[in-house]
């Protein structure tokens, strides 16, 4: 797959951070870090997790083996190896169980933990997939709202130059393209 197509790029002038919606393969983005929607073992899997592991090569798996997994809502960082991104931030999203089991807070924790690690490592550009919206069944619109709201809050200090919401499908890109300007208008 080719590099992602940029759907929208807006700057929140108060925040000094550019927020971009991209459609395509997150493994092709030349950013400081891409976020991996990983499982708790961090040892690869399906979806975006498998794609990132395949694109990064076997050294990513070797480094992940040293991390002793990751809890839901938290994140860990590795090198990017064969990826254009210098780093991979692995986060474990919640499985949707109807919304009464802390899923929203756990999902927000994924974005907070990922951006906290990026800030700690001095990373200026971070790309996120739509965490938990695939096989973990988190409803797309609430997930996108949580992603955008949390990214806006975490970027208030001006630590980031760009945050990318990289969507694999047209429907998810259209959803972010609709919700992002609304959120930025309120920032």
Image: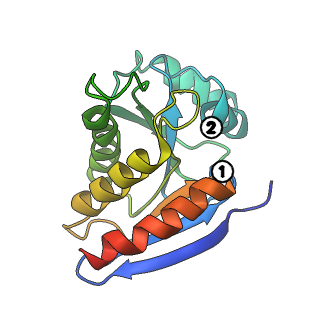
The image's colouring method is: rainbow
Task: Classify 10 Å Cα crowding around label 2: few (below 14), some (14-19), many (20 and above).
Answer: many
Please report the residue visible at 48 percent of the width from the left and 35 percent of the height from the top: 132
Q: Are marks 1 and 2 in contact (CB under 8 Å)?
A: yes
- Name which residue lies at 33% across and 29% down: 99
Q: Quadrant of the C terminus?
A: bottom left
What residue sits right under mark 1 in the picture? 168
Q: Is residue 39 left or right of residue 13?
A: right
**Disc on res. 48:** 2
Q: Residue furthest right?
A: 1
Q: Compared to 185, does 140 lie above or below? A: above
Q: Which of the 4 image quadrants contains residue 111?
A: top left
Q: Position of residue 34 (x, y in %)?
A: 51, 49
Along the line of sight, the residue nearer the viewer: 101 or 2: 101
- In the image, residue 123 above or below residue 130: below
In the rendered image, the residue lying farthest to the left is 157
Residue drawn at point x = 65 percent, y = 33 percent? 47
């Amino acid at each position: 797959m080719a590099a992602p197509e940029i759907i929208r790029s807006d700057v929140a002038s108060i925040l000094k951070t550019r927020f971009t919606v991209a459609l395509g393969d997150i493994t092709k983005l030349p950013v400081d870090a891409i976020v991996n929607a990983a499982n708790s073992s961090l040892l690869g899997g399906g979806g975006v997790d498998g794609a990132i592991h395949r694109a990064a090569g076997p050294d990513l798996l070797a480094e992940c083996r040293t991390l002793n997994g990751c809890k839901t809502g938290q994140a860990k960082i590795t090198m990017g190896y064969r990826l254009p991104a210098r780093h991979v931030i692995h986060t474990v999203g919640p499985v949707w169980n109807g919304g009464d089991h802390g899923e929203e807070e756990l999902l927000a924790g994924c974005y907070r933990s990922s951006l906290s690690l990026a800030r700690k490592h001095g990373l200026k550009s971070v790309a996120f997939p739509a965490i938990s919206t695939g096989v973990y069944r988190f409803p797309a619109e609430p997930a996108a709202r949580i992603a955008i709201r949390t990214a806006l809050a975490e970027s208030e200090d001006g630590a980031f130059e760009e945050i990318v919401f990289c969507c694999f499908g047209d429907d998810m890109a259209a959803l972010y393209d609709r919700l992002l300007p609304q959120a930025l208008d309120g920032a």
